[in-house]
Image (cartoon, grey):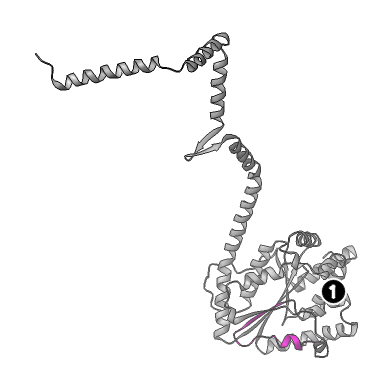
Amino acid sequence: MAKPRLDIEKEEKESLDHASSSADEQEDDPEEKLAVEHENAEEKAQPGKKKKKQKKVKENKAKTICIDGQEVRLKEFVKEYKNLVEGAPKLNKYQRKAIKRYHREEALKPYQAELIRMQKHLELNKRRMVILFEGRDAAGKGGTIRRVTRYMNEKHYRIVALGKPTEHQKTQWFFQKYVTEFPRGGEVVLFDRSWYNRAVVEPVFGFCTNEEYNDFMRGVTGFEKDLVRQGTVLVKLYFSVTKEEQARRFERRKTDPLRQWKLSEIDVQAQNRWDDFTRQKYEMLKRTHTNVAPWTIIRSNNKHEARLNAMKIILNAVPYDRGNKDLDYVPDPDVVISGAREKELMDAQLLKLGRFIG
């Protein structure tokens, strides 16, 4: 029986391929053959050489690894990993600080919401409010003011921080430059330092005469009494920080480029004149703390607690309809004390030690 045509063609093709392959084998380059023979001879003479070569190739391949489809040099990967491990404690520290700060800021928000509500009450009733922020340098006055006003309607509050008096102001009634900054109906004015510069800072540095100082101390209580009698809500806050904490904050201002602008010549001298400031503080509390315009002392070594309690004091000064009845509006007695109580404590220090501590 005759073979099919397709089978015949297939057999012919296989025969041709076999013949071609044999021819190629016969036509190999003689030099290549010699090289192969030489290599085989070397392998027989040094049987471990090929293995070493193979091992080296494997080692070279092991120097890169594949991460997410990308070739990465192993040495670089290990170096980066070590850097991450070494930097982890520092990173964790920053993370903890950031989380802590976030929680502190969140804790203030319910009180900041109440401050907006209080501000609306003042606006609707055309009431005026003046808040004095006094205290040691670096005690946290500015930071507290920023937190108090952060969400308030900026159309209805102002922050006043007056500089050195001009030559023209020196010829005026002392209170005049402050009176021109007083609030209209429905407005809150926050003084970042106030007329009490004359009670503390000016006498310490000799910026006023004894006569000017005594005139102020005799007249300020009557001035504040008239202010309150005419319907202004007056809150007087004094931020008290320890000498050690003040020194730490000054050092941070020196080394932190973002805080260096806060450091003034007066700040530099504040530590050396600590006792002078303390004596002036005592006289201020003794002569200007009244039932009509009392001082409230805020221990401000802990900035967050100082800010929180300052908000409580401000909210308690205005009888408005509170939005959040569940909030704790009672100031912490470990942070907040009256000016009268602070004077008693200072009297006890003087009696026991013969000097003031702070």
| Towards the viewer: 345 or 131 | 131
Quadrant in which residue 187 is drawn: bottom right
| Towards the viewer: 328 or 71 | 71
Q: Is residue 167 magenta?
A: no
The image shows residue 113 at horizontal and vertical percentages of: 55, 71
The range drawn in magenta is 172-193
Which part of the image, by quadrant, shows the C terminus?
A: bottom right
Can residue 261 be seen?
A: yes
| Towards the viewer: 319 or 1 | 1
Q: Which residue is mark 1?
A: 280
Q: Is residue 181 magenta?
A: yes
Element type at mark 1: helix
- Under mark 1, the amino acid is Gln
Quadrant in which residue 209 is drawn: bottom right
Name the residue rendered at 54%, 38% in the picture.
Answer: 72
The image shows residue 208 at horizontal and vertical percentages of: 87, 81
The image shows residue 116 at horizontal and vertical percentages of: 56, 75
Can residue 348 be seen?
A: no
- Up the image or down, 44 lies above or below 231; here it is above
Name the residue rendered at 54%, 76% in the picture.
Answer: 117
Quadrant in which residue 303 is drawn: bottom right
User: Exactly how many numbered labels are in the figure?
Assistant: 1
- Up the image or down, 85 lies above or below 10; here it is below
Name the residue rendered at 63%, 44% in the picture.
Answer: 88
| Towards the viewer: 325 or 268 | 268
The image shows residue 235 at horizontal and vertical percentages of: 69, 78
- Up the image or down, 78 lies above or below 101; here it is above
Toward the left, the furthest residue is 1
Question: Does residue 243 appear to the left or right of 335 in the view shown?
Answer: right
